[in-house]
Image (tube, rainbow, N blue to C red):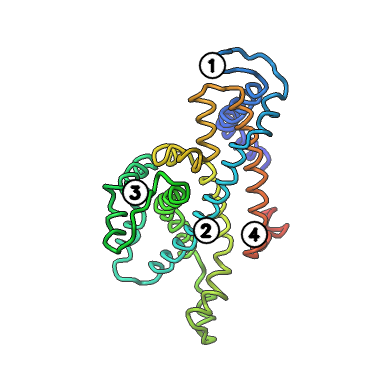
Amino acid sequence: MDGLRRHKSMFLLPGLLTLLLIIVFPLLFTIRVSFSGWNVSNPEMDFVGGANYVKVLHDSRFWAANLRLVLLAGGTVLIQYLIGFGLALLVWRNVRGRRLWRVLFLVPMMTTPVVMAAVWQMIFHESLGPVNDLLAKLGIAPVHWLTEAGPALAALMTVEIWQWTPFMFLLMLAGLLSLPKEPFLAAAIDGAGAWRTFWKVTFPLMAPVSVSAIIIRLIEASKLSDTVYVLTSGGPGSATESPGYYLYLRGLKEQQTGYAGSLSLTYLVLMVVTLTIVAALLARAFKVPKQSSKAKEQ
């Protein structure tokens, strides 16, 4: 048996080594770059110590972008979860045309974020977009969707919700389809109604899937940059800048390579710590059961 496991490990070793090289080398190189003064006027890997990290600590624009991301990611993922879960519940049962609805709900996710953002940029256009035309018919003054801070954030959140709610819907529907039937049969025998069955049976059984889906979407939302680039370019001013877009400005547009390396590593640490804490809080809030030692051994 030990020999069989050893041979299995040998087959997995090439892929594992390749994966480690893909992950470890860029990380080590970024660490080295972050301690250098490499920029557009000084293309050298000279050592500057922790000067870049001191600059990061005093970079109010970077920290503002992180706080803004908390609002964007937290708000959009929560709404995506609620809508996605609701849509999954609608097509979970024997609804007429449920296969067609399942496909239609996935259409926004099939479009690349850049294309989707370009479409929504036209939709939110202040003079030609259909959103302000609809508001005018309702007697509401036109909104400067992409040139004012508040409306621009709302527009960005709308695009994210439209784009990625289907992903949440897909995960929640897969979770619902995998639920055992016995608890629902027991609830029906006890005379529980639809609402009570949902809160006492469906929602608790879906807790592990819910936590996993929310964490996956938070990880993806933390990388928000392409939609910002196309829709608002971080504007007006820096009102819609995300950390990812700010890293693009510093590292690629302004060629502050060393400083961008320190920004990216700081952001990586922040995201790992934050998402670990959020995952633990979500598991406690949803009361996800911990695996027993026997289950872990199996």
Q: Secondary structure at mark 4?
A: helix
Question: What's the residue type where badge 2 is placed?
Answer: Leu
Q: Secondary structure at mark 3?
A: loop
Marks 2 and 1 sit apart, C-alpha to C-alpha, by: 41 Å
Q: Tell me where residue 60 appears, x and y as whole percent.
A: 62, 37
- Residue at the location (56% across, 67% down)? 205
Tell me the number on the disc at residue 195.
none
Picture residue at 71% right of the left edge, 60% below the top: 292
Determine which residue is flagged by label 3: 124
Q: Secondary structure at mark 1?
A: loop
Of residues 4 and 292, the one drawn nearer to the viewer in this rendering: 292
Q: CA distance from mark 2 to mark 4?
A: 15 Å
The residue beneath circle 4 is: 283
Between the residue at mark 3 and the residue at mark 4, the CA separation in whole angstroms equals 38 Å
**Vertical relation: 185 (above or below) 159:** below
Q: Of discs 3 and 4, which sits in the foreground?
A: 3
Seen at 32% across and 47% down, the residue is: 126
Q: Which amino acid, mark 3? A: Phe
Q: Residue 280, image x and y in percent? A: 67, 55
The residue carrying mark 2 is 78
Measured from the top left, where is residue 80 in percent x and y?
47, 57
Q: Which label's residue is closer to the chain start, 2 or 4? A: 2
Picture disc at residue 40: 1
Query: Type of residue at label 1?
Result: Val
- The kind of residue on which mark 4 rests is Ala
Task: Say few, some or many: other residues with alpha carbon within 10 Å of mark 2 (under 14 / 14 to 19 / 20 or more).
Answer: some
Q: Nearer the viewer, mark 2 or mark 3?
A: 3
Mark 3 to mark 1: distance in Å?
Answer: 36 Å
**Tag 4 or tag 1, which sits nearer the N-term?**
1
